[in-house]
Image: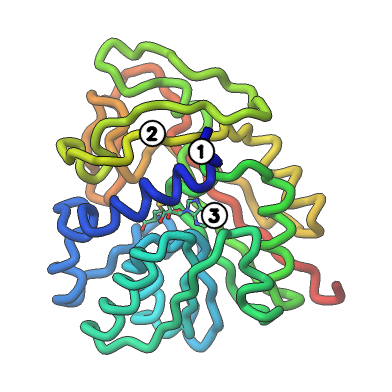
Amino acid sequence: MTDPIELNRRRWDELVPIHAGSRFYDVEGFLAGACSLLPIELAELGDVRGKSLVHLQCHFGLDTLSWARRGARVTGVDFAPAAIAKAAELAEQAGLAARFVESEVTAAPDALGGETFDVVFTSWGVLGWLPDLDAWARAVAALLTPGGVFYLVESHPTMLLFDGSADGRRTWPYFRTAEPIEATVEGSYAAPDATLENRREAVWIFELGQVVTALIDAGLCLDFLHEHDGNCSAMIPSMTKHPDGLWRLPEGELGLPLSFSIRARRASNS
Ligand SMILES: C[S@@+](CC[C@H](N)C(=O)[O-])C[C@H]1O[C@@H](n2cnc3c(N)ncnc32)[C@H](O)[C@@H]1O
């Protein structure tokens, strides 16, 4: 059996050119000046001008480069070589200073030579690929300067119970198992009709309590944990897009948390 991390890396590598050409990512709009970040993360993370920022699991760098446009000194990290190459190409095309480093996320502190940052940012679709949340949280803490800020916005594990079918069928358990769930997936959230060679993926369930506890155990102090009624993509067919860029269930439908966000800090004296 292929190592699950390698299985996922191959799939993400193949998705890079497909996503870079998708309407979902709208690279043309980005190059024309549009910001790929959503109002929620801009408001909750706040001003990054003059700060050093590392973006973990940066995909092909649109969000990383959007933070650069807002004045941060940015580094993007991803384990997919095609993502790193495309991100560097886009930085050049956009005339933005940025560094992109190929690394598995838990190895990022070593790959970056022990450098620390004012901000560690990571968003939307990152936690399900991680077999060890404690190792991930330790990497986040190791990348932060004392007093530095960590920000995560991610799909809510409750939303991930549903497989996206129109009848609201529930297919996934809530509680994490050591072994990943392996599945064959046609297309992707950004390119549902794409035909991929690498259709197998391995996903680990993440429980909300495990994510928060892993960060606390790694020494971070939480500013907030917010639960939201919207998500960055339409994972349930009845969802519609709102002016703030988030997709929500129709009004009156039984409410579910569709995403959550965490801001936390490394203590100044740690
Ligand atoms: C859903 S994307 C993140 C999306 C990002 N918010 C965006 O829209 O650009 C997930 C990213 O995580 C990366 N990734 C998955 N597992 C990883 C790992 N173990 N280490 C580093 N990167 C990983 C993938 O290559 C992919 O670029």
Residue 2 placement, left or right of 241: right
Q: Is mark 1 within 8 Å of ligand 1?
A: no
Q: As rendered, which of 76 and 222 lies closer to the eye?
A: 76
Task: Report the amino acid beneath label 3.
Answer: Leu
The structure residue drawn at horizontal position 47% and vertical position 80%, both measured from the top left corner, is 74
Q: Residues within 10 Å of mark 3 (few under 14, many from 20)?
A: many
Provide the secondary structure element on which disc 1 rests. loop
Percent position (x, y) of residue 62?
A: 32, 67
Task: Report the amino acid beneath label 2.
Answer: Arg
Residue 173 higher or lower than 26, as above or below: above
**Ligand 1 location (quadrant):** bottom left
| Residue occupied by mark 3 | 152
Disc 1, disc 2: CB below 8 Å?
yes
Which is in the foreground here, disc 1 or disc 3?
1
Q: Quadrant of residue 270?
A: bottom right
The structure residue drawn at horizontal position 21% and vertical position 83%, both measured from the top left corner, is 93
The structure residue drawn at horizontal position 26% and vertical position 41%, both measured from the top left corner, is 197
Disc 1, disc 3: CB below 8 Å?
no
Which is in the foreground here, disc 1 or disc 2?
1
Which label was assigned to residue 200? 2
Q: Mark 1 or mark 2: name the one nearer the start of the chain.
A: 1
Residue 26 placement, left or right of 131: left
Q: What is the C-alpha distance between the residues marked 1 and 2?
A: 10 Å
| Residue occupied by mark 1 | 2
Task: Report the amino acid beneath label 1.
Answer: Thr
Residue 169 higher or lower than 164, as above or below: above
